[in-house]
Image: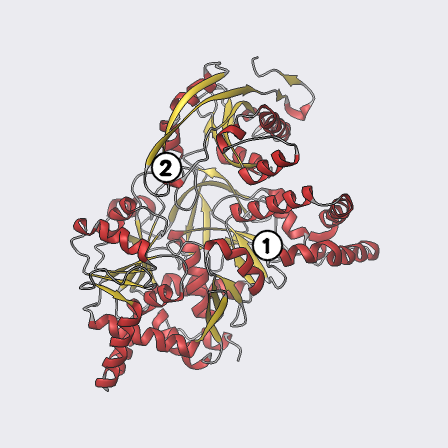
Amino acid sequence: MAGSPVVERLDEDTFPKILLRNGVVYKDRPAVREKDLGIWQAWTWAEVLDEIRAFAIGLKGLGFQKGDRIAIIGANRPRLYWTMVAAQSLGGVPVPIYSDSVAEEMVFVLQHAEVKFACVEDQEQVDKVLSISDRLPTMEQVIYDEDRGLRDYDHATLHSFETVQVAGRKTMADDPQAVKAWEESIAATKGDDIAVMLYTSGTTGQPKGVMLSFDNLVISARNGNKFDKLDEHEEIVAYLPMAWIGDHVFSLAQAYTAGYCVNCPESAETVEADRREIAPTYFFAPPRVFENMLTHIMVRMEDASKLKKRMFDYFMDVARRVGEPILNGEDVSFKDRLLYRLGEFLVYGPLKNQMGFTRLKVGYTAGEAIGPEIFRFYRALGLNLKQLYGQTEASVYITMQPDGQIYGDTVGTPAPQVEIRIADNGEVLYRSPGVFVGYYKNEEATKNTKTEDGWVLTGDAGIITDEGHLKIIDRAKDVGKLKSGDLFAPKYIENKLKFFPNVKEVVAFGDGRDFASVFVNIDLTAVGSWAERNNVNYASYQELAANPQVYKMIEEHVDQVNRDLSREPMMAGAQIRRFLILHKELDADDGELTRTLKVRRSFIADRYAPLIEALYDGSTEKHVRTEVTYEDGRKGAIEATVQIRDMKTYAPEGDVTREAAE
């Protein structure tokens, strides 16, 4: 049965109401799958309705009431998604938390949100919550999904998911009115009720609790489904952090409103293999995922036979020339179409199969800018990869790329029902049905972000192109100027370097200074593969990062970026004069990245101040000692003497070379 006519029912304005509908309309269609011990387990929408109903009634029996908040902590598991909708059906509010957060990081969110219940994945997450329980005065009950290792714990306030469901089913058997009462509580939910609180990753200061209503999420999800013609036949893989707005919209909001199936992989380590088995039709990933996939492809091709490498190079040249025009429906010669079809059989098809994209209808990337060359690589293979621009505060969608209007350096036109304008200072503002209700217990931050007439300040600087597409330059607060007055946009410079497969992360400096400089993190997978092919011995990331041949490799990349920047009038003055390869990988556990892997610039500027100073005082090396946090929470330190290299810069048009020292 087609989903569109039913999806348009505006009285179904909350996810619990939509669940009741899906349990009837799509009752025999798969709603969710989970891979467990190598076998995919599936639940239909009718079965999901039964699972959520039993858990919700059991949860109510534990004392969960309207307005209560429940923390959701763990990897992508069906029961954790069901818990969110069960809590909503009782008038409660789910608060997803990043599962890789250490206990100390969780304290602020759990305290600030006044969480009363927690539903967690396993023993690891139970231990985190219990270790800080004396600092959580509002916490009453903890529910867990996996029971391994928890048998001997005190279960006075600790319950298995099954136990709660058993209690719920017993209540239904004993009280004929229990189901009716639950359905009445669902009927009482309204579109303007708070559906979820998602805490921002906190690149500066403490995270803020973004309150999103059902209207925000349901309307945005329906608009996204319409835009890309998504229906109940889609398949997605849920692998992104549940605390991130992207996963919440793609794996819950759009899944419920369209009726499609969400597939939960067995573990983080099996995501790629599980994706190949499912072959999703709808896929979202931040640029880093696409960058890593391309890195693995290029590494494998370097290890391939000469014949395979030549064939790959030849047909990729064909794809770069005609792949995107064919995808866009443009006129292409018969000869090129024939060559491209042969390339599909020999190269593109096998590549897409390895990545799990053989059935991909539409793919999206967002969260950071993706290198145009990386973006074009995937589209050249015939994959309908698009960019969107979004925020937690927008319920994801601000701009989207319409089919046939896809450019590597822009993020699309305003999404359905979204208005965009550029402020006098270049900042992007938007207004839409997805605009958040406010920040929880932070009226001042809400007023500073959202105007009285509903416009949201994004904090990003951008321009509208002649085609009506939005082009993001950088974070507005990060865009600065060199002492010469030349524009300095760090993210723009960083993304150019991150295009190279052996560069994992970059941090650029230059605002208010004489010239631009960068820290570089090498990609251990790509550079390690290079080292093996070239008989370069190394024992650690630190040792490989200090290798003179690796420095020479990065020098060549920086030189290419400088040549590219010299051809761009706005950015020619911000060519990289000096760089260093950082002696350790930037890590969220060390506070250098957010949990969504965004660089925390101010933290890095403070932590590595001696290295930054060395970039600008003419030093050729600097000895540093850096504290690190291991996975088990222990502290340690890494010491290294970091080399600093000077680079050539180029006059506009690239015809005159200047030495950096000048």
Compared with residue 271, is residue 511 higher up or lower down, i.e. above or below?
Answer: above
Q: Is residue 7 above or below residue 296?
A: below
Mark 2 Cα-neighbour bin, 10 Å: few <14, some 14–19, many ≥20: some
Does residue 448 appear to the left or right of 490 in the view shown? Answer: left
Return the residue found at the far right.
335
Q: Check disc 2 and report its element: helix, strand or loop.
A: helix
At mark 1, the secondary structure is strand
Q: Quick one: which residue is furthest to the bottom in this view?
A: 176
Q: Which mark is residue 237?
A: none
Name the quadrant containing residue 202: top left
Q: In this orientation, which residue lies closer to the viewer: 199 or 519?
A: 519
Residue 351: horizontal and vertical position, in percent? Answer: 66, 54
- Can residue 11 be spotted in the picture? no
Q: Name which residue type carries label 1.
A: Leu
Task: State the residue position of label 1.
Answer: 385
Residue 441 falls left or right of residue 330: left
What x and y, as percent, mark residue 383? Answer: 63, 56
Residue at (49, 22) in percent of width and height: 485
User: Which residue is at 28% across, 67% downward?
Assistant: 160
The mark nearer the N terminus, 1 or 2, is 1
Q: CA distance from mark 1 to mark 2?
A: 33 Å
Location of residue 22 (image quadrant): bottom left
CB contact under 8 Å: marks 1 and 2: no
**Which amino acid lies under the numbered mark 2 shown in the image of this protein?**
Asp
Q: Nearer the viewer, residue 568 or 281?
A: 281
In the depicted view, which residue is nearer to us: 556 or 538? 538
Q: Residues within 10 Å of mark 1 (few under 14, many from 20)?
A: many
Q: Nearer the viewer, mark 1 or mark 2?
A: 2
Q: Would you name the residue on which mark 2 appears? A: 590
Question: What is the tally of numbered marks visible in this picture?
Answer: 2
